[in-house]
Amino acid sequence: MGTRNTSAPLRAQSAAADNQSRTRRHGGGITHDNTRHTTRFVVIGNHLVQHKELSLLAIGLGCHLQSLPTGAGADIKTLAARFPEGPTRIAAALRELEAHGYLRRERHRTTTGRIVTRTVSCNQPGASRREPADTGCPPAKRTPPPPRRTGHKALPAVPQPSHKAPALLQAALDLLADLRRRDPRLLLSATDTAHLAPGVAAWLERDVTPAAVRHALTTGLPDEPLRRPAALLAHRLTDRLPPPPPFRPPSISVPPRQPLQNCEGCDRGFRAPETEDRCRDCRKVAAPA
C-alpha cells in the first residue's frame, strides 16, 4: 500500500499542461532551430508577438514597424504598397496597435508651416518615463479625441470706418481673401475675415489704395510659422493706421455777373437779367398800379 505508482500523472496537472504533455509524447508541436543573429535583427517582446487581443495582422504589422529604421515611411499608403493587404485592413491594424499602446501618432508643424503626422512605434507600452524615449511608450488611453478648441483668445479690435457702405466692406473682404496669394500663411477663416474687414475699410476710406494696404499687411512678416495670423493683421491695421486725409472745404461758387443795361423808366443803368427792363426802384413804383 505504501508503494507509489510513479508513472501515473498528477491529478493537479492543468488541462493545458496535459495537452502539451500529450503533444510532446506523440511527437507533435513546434520545435526551434535557432541560430544567433549578429546583424540585421530586431528584438521583439513576447508581449507583442503573443498578445491575446491583437489580431495576427496587427502583430505582424507591429513587428514590421519596430524593424523599420528611423525616418522610414509608415503611413497607410506606403504600407499598402508594401504588403498585399489593402488600406482598409492596414488602417484597422494600425488602430489596434494604437489602442494597445504600440503606436502613437503625433502632429508636428514644420518650419514652412505645414502640418505633418509623425508615427512613433513603441516597443514597450507602459514603460517608465525615466527610460530613453525610444524604449517605450505610455499606454494608450481609450478616450475620445479632445474637442476642438473654441475658446481662443479674442482678436484685437480694429479701426472702424465712419460709413460702412456695402461696396467699401466688399472691397475690404476681397482684399483680405487675396492675402493668401501673397503668403500662404495668411489663409483666414470666414470669422477672422469678417472681424478684420472694417479695419481694412477704415484704411480704404482714408484714400489708401488697395495695393498700399496689402503692402502694409504683408511686408516684413516673421519667418517662423504664424500661430495667429488674424491677430497679427489686426495689430497692423490698428498700429499702422494712416491719418485721415486733409480737410478740403468746398469751393465757394460766385454767381456770374448780370449784364448792364438802362432802365426803361428812369434811364438809369442797372444790372439784371435781360428779361428785366426796369430797375428795382421803378419796379417798386409800378407795383401798386
Image (cartoon, rainbow, N blue to C red):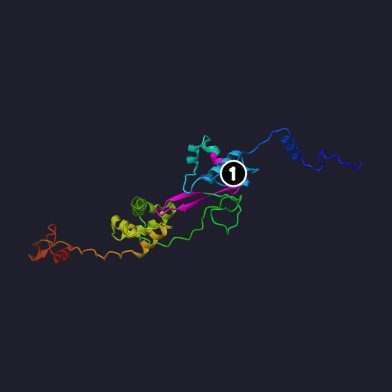
Give the residue at the far right of this rendering: 1
Please say whether residue 195 is one of the residues in the magenta stretch.
no
Task: Please state which of residues 165 and 200 is positioned toward the viewer in this rendering.
Answer: 200
Q: Residue at x 50, y 40 (%)?
A: 79
Quarter of the C terminus within the rendering: bottom left
Q: Residue at x 42, y 60 (%)?
A: 231
Q: Position of residue 110 (x, y in %)?
A: 43, 53
Please say whether residue 95 is one of the residues in the magenta stretch.
yes
Label 1 crowd (10 A; few <14 / some 14-19 / many >=20): many
Task: Please state which of residues 30 and 133 is positioned toward the viewer in this rendering.
Answer: 30
Q: Secondary structure at mark 1?
A: helix
Question: Which amino acid type corresponds to the residue marked 1 in the rendered image?
Answer: Glu
Magenta segment: 90-119
Image position of 109 (left or right of 261) = right
Q: Position of residue 227 (x, y in %)?
A: 43, 57
Give the residue at the far front of this rendering: 3
Image position of 65 (left or right of 207) = right
Image position of 130 (left or right of 247) = right
Tell me the residue that label 1 is attached to: 96
Image position of 31 (left or right of 88) = right
The mark total stands at 1
Q: Position of residue 69 (x, y in %)?
A: 49, 47
Q: Position of residue 196 (x, y in %)?
A: 39, 57
Task: Please state which of residues 236 and 19 is positioned toward the viewer in this rendering.
Answer: 19
Q: Is residue 253 above or below residue 145?
A: below
Quarter of the N terminus within the rendering: top right
Q: Residue at x 44, y 60 (%)?
A: 155
